[in-house]
Image (cartoon, grey):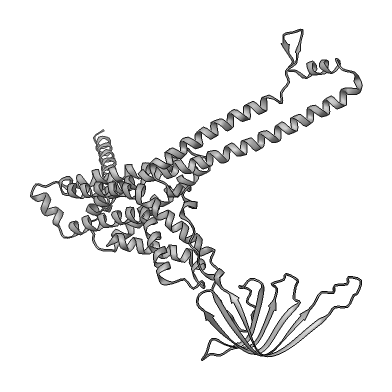
Amino acid sequence: MTFFVSLFVLLMQFLWKYIDDLVGKGLEWHVIAELMFYASASLVSLALPLSILISSIMTMGSMGEHYELVALRSAGISLRRVMQPLIIFSCATSALAFYFSNNLLPIANLKMGTLLYDIRHKKPTLDLRPGIFYKGIDGFAIRVGAKNELDPNALYNVMIYDHTENKGNKKIIVADSGRMEFEGDHYLLLTLFSGKSYEQQDNKDRADHSYPHMRNEFKKELIRFDMSEFTMNRSNEEIFKDNYKMQSLGQLYENLDTLKANLDQRKVNFYQNLKRNFKYLQLDGYSIIRTAPAYRRVLTMYPEPQYARIVEAALNMARSTRSYTHSSRDDVNARQVRMNRYYIEAHRKFTLSIACLILFFIGAPLGAIIRKGGLGLPTVFAIAFFLIYYVLSITGEKFAKEGMWSVWSGMWLSSLALLPVGLFLTYKATTDSKIFEWEFYLRPIKRLFERIRQKLKVSEDSSDIA
């Protein structure tokens, strides 16, 4: 139940994110349903850890609230033994999560990415609004003065600018009324009544500055528009297969080997090309010139009129070398960033499974400690821990993408941060510690004050005796 609720909430967030790309394009219901299905598959990596966290807190909290854990412990069954079936189930869920992220998620990302690309590049449907020029049809600008509320296909005061020849507003059609009808899915038939057409023709003689003008009157005229560009064309999925989000673990490491070999070759080529721009001169047959005075001694070896040309050539070569170094540095950094994305996606296959286990070991003992079931207090704790996990995951992944952190530390930041919390809560739950009761935290303070009071009393007694 918690899995589907979490998935529904995340799916609504996805829908609002891409609502501008979906509205007004006349998409059929099965296209939107297909997109939602693939999007829900891509959101499992967030919904599954959250659902395990909420459900484990609710289950153990409900058992603690109804004193079932107390009854089990009184029968000699420890909390560790009670959690054993849940641990086995969580391990199986983690294994299935790895299989899903490695084998099924790349396919879902490929199909969702392809379909979303096609939807984004689909033109909006024909929407003629009174008083507003519509330019959705290439080569035409259409304006209608009013529409019939009872018959949406009936138009009044129609004005059409024909730009098919790309010569400006030289051809205009005006009609008192018209009717719009579709011929299948690829053509729009616009029937105009009682109108005129105006066309400014080009003058064949450039020396003549007169501009011929032609006007036609008609009682009925048919204009057919090609609407094939408004249909959604499905792209070939092979175009998007090279994306790192759409590859399995084996494919990622295979591409990483290729990228690493190309990067090493790029560094070797940079060194070989850079080495050609340096000239090492020797004096006395063995000493390499490295200091400025020594270089000035070299200039004395040439006639003085050549000094300026030699210095200018050296400066040009230095500028060229600096420009080549900067461009090579940017290219190497771009290649390294691309490799980091592949490494991040490879680590993501494992972080999902480990996150399910860690959040279970947070949720189950936490539910046994707070002893509250339902969707109230357990949900608050679950959302708090999940937000910590999500923020750490996003932060570590961003730093890893930018190269500020290593990929390993960035992708495993959230797991390493929450693992001690899970171990601590598990230990406290198995030892029946009441860490959420004020008495638990006030007890050491009371003991401290009691010791201070006793010491003061002893000192007062000793002073009275003296």
Q: Quadrant of the C terminus?
A: top left
Residue 414 visible in image: no
Left or right of 9: which side holds 400? right
Residue 315 visible in image: yes
Q: In which image quadrant can residue 310 be found?
A: top right
Left or right of 109: which side holds 187? right
Q: Residue at x 68, y 34 (%)?
A: 324
Q: Percent x, y for residue 410?
A: 44, 42
Q: In which image quadrant can residue 141 be found?
A: bottom right
Decide which of 34, 376 is in the foreground and name it: 34
Q: Is residue 174 above or below residue 425?
A: below
Q: Percent x, y for residue 134?
A: 63, 77
Q: Percent x, y for residue 109?
A: 42, 54
Q: How many numbered badges does the structure rendering display?
A: 0
Q: Is residue 99 above or below residue 263?
A: below
Decide which of 462, 5 is in the foreground and name it: 5
Left or right of 422: which side holds 168? right
Q: Quadrant of the N terminus?
A: bottom left
Decide which of 28, 162 is in the foreground and name it: 162
Q: Residue furthest left?
A: 75
Decide which of 14, 184 is in the foreground and name it: 184
Q: Is residue 146 above or below residue 276?
A: below
Q: Percent x, y for residue 430?
A: 20, 45
Q: Is residue 143 above or below residue 251?
A: below
Q: Residue at x 53, y 38 (%)?
A: 336
Q: Residue at x 41, y 71 (%)?
A: 29
